[in-house]
Amino acid sequence: MSFKKLLIALYLFVFCFSFAETHEGTAEAAKDEKYNPVPFIMHHIQDAHNWHLWGEGHNSVGISLPVILWDNGLKVFSSEKFGHEEEKVAEVDGNFYKVHHNKIYSTDANGTLDMHDGHPTNNEPLDFSITKVVAQMILAAIIILLIGFAAASSYKKSQVPSGIAKFIEPIVVFVRDDIALQNIGSVRYRKYVPYLVTLFLFIWVLNILGLLPGAANTTGNIAFTMVLAVFTLLIVNLSGRKTYWMHMFDPLGSNMPFAGKILVYIILVPVELLGIITKPFALMIRLFANMTAGHIIIMSLISLIFIMKTYMITPVSLGLSLFIYVLEVLVAALQAYIFTMLTALFIGSAVEEPHHDH
């Protein structure tokens, strides 16, 4: 337990050090001004075309990621052309591009953006780039694959789990017995176990990676959670049995004549059909909001040092940040469980066997 506390304290020290270093150059100029933490916080939780680790300007340290654009042909180049702060104009095959609010626009050699109501009207090429969020998704996928292959290799040697298999087997059994079996039913639960295990591990690993210094807030990205929600939407509705769809279009069943149900169905059927969208939408918002809120709270607490312009507040700021960080470690697993459990619950409602009166 003391080792875990040491790791958490080390994370906060590194985070605070990089935070202070980022703003060291502007501290004197802003001595008489009220510090605004919003730009720094938003920079952390948003996606980017380069993986910034720490520092600012020429002292900035980060990883350049590949930019892939379709603009009258394929354009592939390094995000290093945009600079560490993405303030430069990138020239590729005689075309010029500039980043504005994490979106890439076609410009001239001077990087001119034609603004209308605060938004550029320049042509926006199709962007298939490997951004920071995508890079962390790939990293998480590699970690899960390595864990899976290592566990499979362990079972080839012996049926008794060893090494990483001791860690992964209880998770798989938990998802199979306590999530899939309980919510889908004993008849059809097995075919959905691989997806549910993958979903649980993928979200959990990404949540944990997001807590490391310099990492991307992948599960706090609304586009990422939307894709997971769309997967759930497709699986649930493609798996839906006749009873599932009959409940949508004829929820009252044979309890009353159809003529008497017409007026009720004018309201009831649209509400039932709306539920097809609202269920995965709730999944999307829940994961996005919870993970983003944790990051914002931690950085806001640390920002108190700079807002109040005194290090006397440091023990309180770091103490509260440490408390929230420990909660975030628990929330990382809890949100993975909730998303997976609700997905299994929605699948279970779609493949449920019809009830018969005895």
Image (cartoon, rainbow, N blue to C red):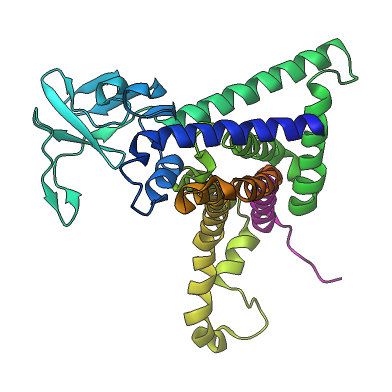
Q: Is residue 229 above or below residue 73?
A: below
State which region is magenta: 334-358
351 or 297, nearer to the observer = 297
Q: Name the residue at the top extreme.
A: 157
Q: Left or right: where does residue 342 sit relative to residue 303? A: right
Q: Left or right: where does residue 155 sit relative to residue 81? A: right
Q: Is residue 40 above or below residue 353?
A: above
Q: Left or right: where does residue 124 sit relative to residue 188? A: left
Q: Left or right: where does residue 319 sit relative to residue 141? A: right
Which quarter shows the C terminus?
Answer: bottom right
- Residue at 59 percent of width and 51 percent of height: 236
Measured from the top left, where is residue 88 in percent x and y? 21, 28
70 or 95, nearer to the observer = 95
- Residue at 91 percent of width and 20 percent of height: 160
Task: Report if residue 235 is visible in the image.
Answer: no
Measured from the top left, where is residue 194 in percent x and y? 68, 34
- Residue at 16 percent of width and 21 percent of height: 91
120 or 352, nearer to the observer = 120
Q: Name the residue at the right extreme.
A: 160
Measured from the top left, where is residue 239 in percent x and y? 60, 49
Which quarter shows the N terminus?
Answer: top right
- Residue at 54 percent of width and 42 percent of height: 219
